[in-house]
Amino acid sequence: MLTEDGKHLYVSYDEYHNLIEKLAIKIHQSGWEFDNILCLARGGMRPGDILSRIFDKPLAIMSTSSYRAEAGTVQGHLDIARYITTPKGEIAGKVLLVDDLADTGHTLRAVVDQLKNNYTPITELRTAVIWTKGVSGFKADYSVEELPTNPWIHQPFEPYDNMRPEKLLEKWSV
């Protein structure tokens, strides 16, 4: 649900999963056949996992990190892992790169550049995201929702960002 001022988008688990299913439909309807899914950790892990199950394709993971300041709400220096975790050998062939959103587009552009320059076994690369913000300088090949007001997206698992084991103990103590 988008707030009236357009600055916050609150997403329930049901909405989140529905959007991933709509993303899968867009990818399927494009007719593009791919060999692997590469998700960006952490935001792309949940969509990547679901797409991997739907398309029955291996899931590889690449870690990136840019949201650090102010409890993860301010973009900072971008770190991209040098290695990709994949179930078989190295990632190769036609690869679908998955993240949750194209915010500024900086992360996706940097990862695409790194993959094209450093991973020659990748023969074709396409990108998929759930959301694309209006300020994004990157246009994914597949996207479900365009967000022209650039809201902060409150994803359903966000409460875990501040959940610590002590809070869980308190919550579940008898």
Image: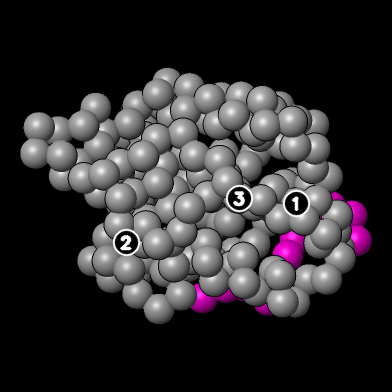
Q: x%, y% of residue 169?
A: 37, 41
* Residue underneath mark 2: 72
How far is mark 2 from mark 3, CA to CA? 24 Å
How far is mark 1 from mark 3, CA to CA? 9 Å
Q: Amino acid at mark 1?
A: Val
Dot 2, crowdedness within 10 Å: few (<14), some or many (≥20)? few
Left/right placement of residue 56 relative to residue 68 reads right
The quadrant of the image that shows the C terminus is: top left
* Residue underneath mark 3: 127
Dot 3, crowdedness within 10 Å: few (<14), some or many (≥20)? many
Residue at x 26%, y 44% (from the top left corner): 148
Measured along the vertical axis of the image, is residue 118 above or below residue 159? below
Q: Are marks 2 and 1 in contact (CB under 8 Å)?
A: no
Q: Give the mark nearer the N terminus: 1 vs 3.
A: 1
Q: Give the mark nearer the N terminus: 2 vs 3.
A: 2
Residue at x 80%, y 51% (from the top left corner): 94
Can you tell which quarter of the image residue 90 is in? Answer: bottom right
Number of marks present in the image shown: 3
Mark 1 secondary-structure assignment: strand
> What range of the chain is rendered magenta?
79-89
Left/right placement of residue 118 relative to residue 147 reads right
Measured along the vertical axis of the image, is residue 19 above or below residue 47? above
